[in-house]
Amino acid sequence: MNRLRSAAILANCLLVLPVLLLNLSQGKDYNVLFIISDDLTYTALSCYGNEVCETPNIDRLAERGVRFTRAYCQGTYCGPSRASFMSGYYPHATGVLGYKNPRPQIGDRATWSQHFKDSGYYAARVSKIYHMGVPGGIEYGGDGRDHDGYNGADDEHSWTERFNSPGPEWKAKGDGETLENNPDGAKPAVGGNTFVVVEADGDDLVHSDGKTSKKAAELIHEHKDKRFWLGVGFVRPHVPFVAPRPYYEPFKPYEKMVLPPKMPGDWDDIPKAGINYKTSENMKMDIRRQKKAVGGYYASVAYMDAQVGVVMNALEEAGIEDETIVIFTSDHGYHLGEHDFWAKVSLRDESSGVPLIICVPGKEPAVCNSLVELIDLYPTTAALCGLPVPERLQGENIAPLLDDPTLEVRDAAFSAAPMRKGVLLRTQDHAFIQYREDASDGIELFDVNEDPDGYTNLADDPEHAGLVQSFRKMMDAKLVKVRDNDLDIEYP
């Protein structure tokens, strides 16, 4: 009888062992809280060294997570970047180089949040995760549109539920000024993708991001007893720079804002395609307006940071901090006067680089200087949560960096600026940019160690001719690789 019992126990153990080993190999059962800001440069955050704009809530995340210093987006404006990290494909693979939903290109393949939803997670977004026009898709009043029901280039298959956060945007009551193309000051505050500052009346909940943080907090409490993938999309600091009045006070008078250096002949050695679409000159912004633009941007960042605090407080109050992976990032960076450039689109670090903080329960806080891409987030979170990692995904699983931040997962980060027909390879030592795939519109090469601000283009220097040729070959190979996928479409 004892032998029979022993045999039965052994048989049961043999049956259970593979399941235990499978669970160990597949990670843990975590929630995913994905927080993304819009048009945020890492240079505006105090945890990345900014000494003027204080961001205590994002800093709090950095203190308990891994802060990446060399993270790059795959598209330097909203549409292609968001479609890329949500679909798991580079923009060149899907052809989503503008403001479209990637669903027609990816067919029935699961997006990032959909992969979790299909695995039993509650998946929801609040406000902007895929592309949604700002301020046009956010503002309300006066145009007859139902902005609460406006989903932009969203993908309904990605979500169990989705929620929008309408707000007044540039129409907010308060003191507004149009800074762009308004040299005589005659224009009132205007809409569109325009540099406008509004010191707004009312509290945080008047505006879109305040509503987003409140709804996200409600969802965290509502779903704390089940697994969730929650995307929280803040629209600030995207123009218009709108925030409640108190957020502006630390940056006033605006005259005290310090602009980046203005170097004579700064553009002389770069191709025409390398000059950004928004500059101090073509925006007709004098020094006063430039300084106010920086102050308005910082105020918008401070307001957004406060909303991050609301969401993180809800996570703590729900008692599920130790069950939740938290990611904070932006869809791309932003110029604040570097080289007299403003806004996004360029392939310089200020525009292509993004803040990235990943907090995983039980992992030690660290700073990681390894090159990573936003497209890596899908496979990484799937692996950490014990879900299958689809082989088709073009990103890398960077989970090993969370245990050892000195590791490297790639030799170079890749980013694209479809509006400029430009592509970037960013290594630890160099930034190589070419415009058009045959480089017919020019090349830029910068030594980021000797010239971190990118004032000397080495592309035409005979001493660097061999390095240029090496990078061109590397770029040709990368462009083949980013298109190497299982999609049956014509490449752009």
Image: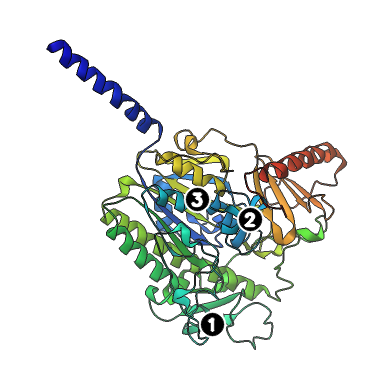
Local crowd size for mark 2, using a 10 Å CA cut-off: few (<14), some (14–19), many (≥20): many
Q: CA distance from mark 1 to mark 3?
A: 43 Å
Residue 81 image position (x, y, % from top left): 59, 56
Residue 352 shows up from this direction: yes
**Circle 1 sits in a helix, a strand or a loop, which is it?**
strand
- The structure residue drawn at horizontal position 63% and vertical position 48%, both measured from the top left corner, is 487
Q: Is residue 226 above or below residue 264?
A: above
Separation of marks 3 and 2 at Cα, in angstroms: 21 Å
Instruction: Return the x and y of residue 103 as percentages of the image width and height.
Output: 56, 58
- In the figure, residue 205 lies in which quadrant? bottom left
- Along the polypeptide, which appears first: circle 1 or circle 3? 3
Q: Position of residue 403 (x, y in %)?
A: 44, 34
| 461 vs 121, nearest the viewer | 121
The amino acid type, in three-letter code, at marker 3 is Ala
Which amino acid, by three-letter code, is at mark 1?
Answer: Gly
- Label annotation for residue 110: 3
